[in-house]
Image: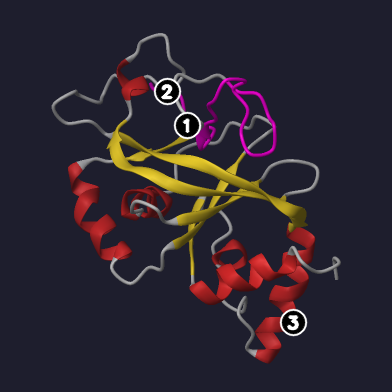
Amino acid sequence: MPKPRKRLGRAAGPDNKGPAGKRTKTKNPAGALAAKGNSSPEKASASKNCGKNLSSYWLMKSEPESRLEKGVDVKARNFLRAMKLEQEAFFYHSNCKEPGIAGLVKIVKEAYPDHTQFEKNSPYYDPSSKEDNPKWSMVDVQFVRMMKRYITLAELKTHYRAHKTTGGPLKDMALFTRQRLSVQPLTPEEFYFILSLEEKEPS
């Protein structure tokens, strides 16, 4: 049985550090982070459908503290395949003492086969995946910048609750309505509202 994919990707660069300076193993060049997801043909049509009406903005979760989970959310994998070049994403730390948004990244390579699924010494090895029909794919994202301040989940939740009443930008944010997704689409309104928070004191 292949091991579950417990993390979203691997940070890269000369010092192997990602947006929040967390050290992780990598084989990727030029400051890219490879985000992993399932790319089996039976999921392709679903991924195209889920990407038709999406914005150019995303939230991608990392896990600075390791966690094993059974299975991977199919919708998140489809969203991964829907990502396009130059789209932007918030880099979000989950499963840690204080979850929140740490930085900004952009998509620099669209979905392609994840080589680690074929490497027997890799924790992501999947014997059921074939080179002529790979089950797993990844996209490359590049670090853009750190947020001017760390925007915590607690702060976002405060705005979400208020916006549910007032009809504000975060009223339907997937971070709260579809919490288990490790890759989430953002509307332009959600993206720019969150971006504006870094210029303000925490509420």
Residue 122 located within the stretch drawn in magenta: no
Residues at marks 1 and 2, CA–CA distance in whole angstroms: 6 Å
**Quarter where residue 148 is shown:** bottom right
Is 109 in front, or is 181?
109
Q: Nearer the viewer, residue 174 or 193?
A: 193
**What amino acid is labelled 3 in the image?**
Ala
Query: Which residue is tagged 1?
Result: 5
At 62% from the left and 66% from the top, the residue drawn is: 176
> In the picture provided, is 148 more to the left or to the right than 5?
right
Instruction: Judge the density around disc 2: few (<14), some (14-19), many (≥20) Cα neighbours within 10 Å.
Output: many
| CA gap, disc 2 and disc 3 | 41 Å
Earlier in the chain: of badge 2 and badge 3, it is 2
The secondary element bearing badge 3 is classed as helix
Q: Which of the 4 quarters of the picture holds residue 2?
A: top left
In magenta, the rendered stretch is 1-24
Mark 2 is on which residue type?
Answer: Tyr
Q: Which residue lies furthest to the top in this view?
A: 121
In-image side of 71 versus 178 (left or right): left
- Secondary structure mainly formed by the magenta segment: loop
In the image, residue 201 sits, relative to residue 21, either above or below, namely: below
Q: Residue at x 76, y 56 (%)?
A: 152
Dot 3 corresponds to which residue?
A: 162
The vertical placement of 199 against 146, above or below, is below
Pointer 2 residue: 124
Q: Are marks 2 and 3 in contact (CB under 8 Å)?
A: no
Q: Quadrant of the N terminus?
A: top left
**Callout 1 touching callout 3 (CB < 8 Å):** no
